């Protein structure tokens, strides 16, 4: 189970996949949706929309 590097929150499979998608597949540090949003200068809702979008596109990270 991956945890957020900033706050230690346990991450869902989707959150881990989202980090890989947004930060690169080789990343060693993962972030919860809130802290990922902070890093990317966006908001949680926008990231949640992206997750849905990537799933619709059939991105293999989200299977
Ligand atoms: Zn966090």
Image (spheres, helix red, strand yellow):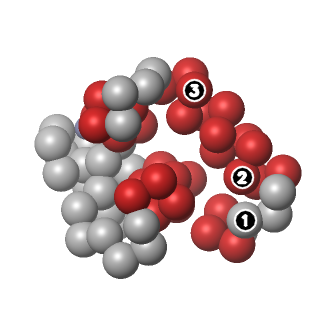
Q: Alpha carbon of mark 2 to alpha carbon of mark 1: how far?
A: 5 Å
Pointer 1 residue: 59
For ligand 1, give the image quadrant: top left
Q: Alpha carbon of mark 2 to alpha carbon of mark 3: how far?
A: 12 Å
Q: Is residue 59 left or right of residue 33?
A: right
Q: The residue tagged with tag 1: helix, strand or loop?
A: loop
Q: Is residue 17 left or right of residue 37?
A: right
Farthest-out residue, front: 41
Pointer 2 residue: 54
Q: Residue at x 45, y 22 (%)?
A: 43
Q: Residues within 10 Å of mark 3 (few under 14, many from 20)?
A: few
Residue 12 seen anywhere in this rendered image of the structure: no
Farthest-out residue, bottom: 26
Compared to 6, does 25 lie above or below? below
Q: Residues within 10 Å of mark 2 (few under 14, many from 20)?
A: some
**Which numbered circle lies on residue 46?**
3
Q: Alpha carbon of mark 1 to alpha carbon of mark 3: how far?
A: 17 Å
Picture coordinates of residue 15 (x, y %)? 47, 50
Picture coordinates of residue 14 (x, y %)? 56, 53
Quadrant where the C terminus lies? bottom right
User: Looking at the image, do the residues carrying marks 2 and 3 touch, with CB atoms under 8 Å apart?
Assistant: no
Q: Residue at x 31, y 70 (%)?
A: 27
Quadrant where the N terminus lies? bottom left
Q: Residue at x 66, y 63 (%)?
A: 62
Counting residues from the N terminus, which is met first, the one under dot 1 or under dot 3? 3
Whether the residue under disc 3 has CB within 8 Å of ligand 1: no
Residue 3 seen anywhere in this rendered image of the structure: yes
Picture coordinates of residue 5 (x, y %)? 18, 51
Q: The residue tagged with tag 3: helix, strand or loop?
A: helix
User: Looking at the image, do the residues carrying marks 2 and 1 touch, with CB atoms under 8 Å apart?
Assistant: yes
Q: Residue at x 28, y 37 (%)?
A: 39
Q: Residues within 10 Å of mark 1 (few under 14, many from 20)?
A: few
């Amino acid at each position: 189970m991956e945890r957020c590097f900033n706050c230690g929150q346990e991450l869902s499979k989707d959150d881990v996949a989202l980090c890989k998608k947004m930060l690169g597949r080789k990343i060693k540090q993962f972030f919860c949706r809130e802290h990922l949003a902070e890093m990317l200068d966006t908001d949680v809702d926008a990231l949640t929309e992206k997750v849905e979008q990537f799933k619709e596109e059939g991105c293999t990270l989200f299977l």
